[in-house]
Amino acid sequence: MIGHESVPPVVAGRPSAGHLLKQAFQAAAGKRLGRKDLGPLAELWPYLKAHPVDTVMGVVFVVVSSTATLGLTVASRRLVDRGFKVHTPHALLASFVIAAAAAAIFALATALRIYFVNKLGERVVVDLRKAVYDHVLKLDLAQVIKVRTGELLSRMTTDMTIVERMISNGAPVAMRCTLTLLGAVVLLLAVSPSFTGWVVVLLPLGLAPLFLSGRHLRNLSTQAQDRFAEAIGCAGEGLEGLETVLAFGQERAIAGQYGHSLERAFTASRRFIRARVTTTGMMISLIAAGILAVLYRCAIAVFVDHTMTPGVLLQLLMLSALAASSARELGEVWGEIQKASGALERISELMAWRPTIAAPALRKPMPKPARGEIEFKDVVFAYPGREDELALNGFSLKVRKGERVALVGPSGAGKSTVFRLLLRFYDPLHGHVAIDGVDLRDADPREVRERLALVAQDAALFSGTASDNIRFGNAEAGPEALKAAACAAQAADFLAALPQGFETSIGERARTLSGGQRQRLVIARALVRDAPILLLDEATSALDAENERLVQQAMHKAMDGRTSIVIAHRLATVLEADRIVVMDRGRVIEQGSHAELSARDGLYARLARLQFAANAA
């Protein structure tokens, strides 16, 4: 047997999954501090490129609407300087037609801009949500369990909404305001270069607060989103365990924890808002001061020096108003862009996680037809974050095709770990696990799992109909196969009695069913899979004595011709196993039939005496 001190040096020096994940978080944090303010927004480019028509049309109409806005100032100047100086209706009408055309172009371009950019925002976020969810489903359990479900959902919902708002509103507004601001400055210089040349000097000064505070704003936004994600995670835990919360009367405590999390999120958001308001106020004040100085000199030129026409003054007034409003909107939307950058950074960090449980580049195909042979050889394994506590320590076991093997032993002996390694949720630190002669690390995890059917003690059921949940084991199963599996699991009678039979909705996590009914539905799901290997983890734990007897008969029939491994704490359920394997502290300490093990007076015999004596009492 391999003890703690005999773990191979390559294992002892090998970083654990928990350590690797910690390094990944530290690396991500380092990138977060060192990355440019808007760097995460580049992650959107592949999604924008996938919809070129909407992207190009959105940009085109942003440019057209900005140009039309500036064109209105030119039309207004012409109307004042030319149209009001003539006394013929035709000349006056011509000036108004030009102004009306500019206004019509502006209205049409604005409407089309809103349509294309909103459509693009919705489409990109849908694609991004799909990509993130698909990626999360491929991650290792060791990665996912370190993050609360609510926090993951926050990244897929709240952060995505922020990104959508930025694409649909923030980015187009920022682009329009930037173009309008630059165009207004260029026209100001073209119309009156003698008075507006120094605006070029004032403009960088006015925009300085925007760029100087960018990184600080993004960090504050990211902190606020992190706190909000924690609050969602807290709420999710409370709702998932609502029955336990109510049973122990902890409603106030859970509500208090959620309230405290929300207050932390609010405090972080308030810091972001305060910084954003300060930046916007400083920028508007500086730009307004420069524009007012220009307008003062223009007014002197019109009314005192008479070196400027009223039409030019009107255009300068309109251009100044456009520049000021564009600067104000740019300051406001900059905060949204920084917030979206923080949200994309959080999403990118999640997308950067890479599963260690994956098909190798040169994977070995599983042999066909499947035999159902299993082998554990000198397996050493510890869960991530618990490297000092070996769950399996030199574990070896061979299971022949069609053999029924029962794993028994005290809690913590490593029985469930055997199933998790077979399903390749984790890889062993040392030794190997093989099915049909193929080391699982050399195979595609999907191919491996296709050969296994699991009945867990507390298996998840999903919202939908009863038939949907059974078909979850085999998407190709027809109505007859579903009914046959239900009959074998002794579930057909209670399913037929439901209002719509097999098509009755069973609610979220099947809470409308009793514990025994849920377990029988799980068994039916495993049976319809028709896999060569059955893994039964306390499969009858939730059944009463009568149903347990019936299901045991059905399970024995289902096991014919299949390899079966059964985990059972109640020894009465494994008496007919071909072989009983007794585990303790991650090792096989004895194995044999019930009669053989009882005669040895070892751990199994002691467990059997205790249980059967308790049942007799």
Image (tube, rainbow, N blue to C red):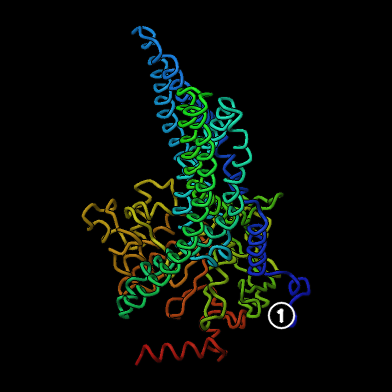
Kindly identify the residue that appears in the image at 49 percent across and 46 percent down.
Answer: 333
Asked whether, in this view, residue 251 is left or right of residue 108, the answer is left
Q: How many marks?
A: 1
The residue at the far right in this view is 9
Q: Position of residue 366 (x, y in %)?
A: 63, 52
**Element class at badge 1:** loop
> What residue is rendered at 43% in x and 88% in y?
611
Relative depth, front residue between 93 and 317: 317
Quadrant for the N terminus in the image: bottom right
Residue 105: give x, y in percent of width and height. 43, 22
State whether residue 158 is above or below residue 228: above
Percent of width and height locating residue 194: 61, 29
Mark 1 neighbour class, 10 Å CA radius: few under 14, some 14 to 19, many 20 or more: some
Residue 236 or residue 15, whichever sits in front: 236
Q: Is residue 142 visible?
A: yes
User: Residue under circle 1?
Assistant: 2
Please give left or right for residue 76 compared with residue 342 in the image: left
Residue at 65 percent across and 50 percent down: it is: 365
- Which residue is depicted at the point 25% across and 53% down? 501
Residue type, mark 1 in image: Ile
Image-based side of 481 in relation to 10, left or right: left
Front in this rendered view, residue 168 or 605: 168
Q: Nearer the viewer, residue 239 or 485?
A: 239
From the image, which quarter does the C terminus lie in? bottom left
Residue 149 seen from this side = no
Q: Position of residue 96 (x, y in %)?
A: 38, 16
Say which quarter of the image contains residue 386.
bottom right
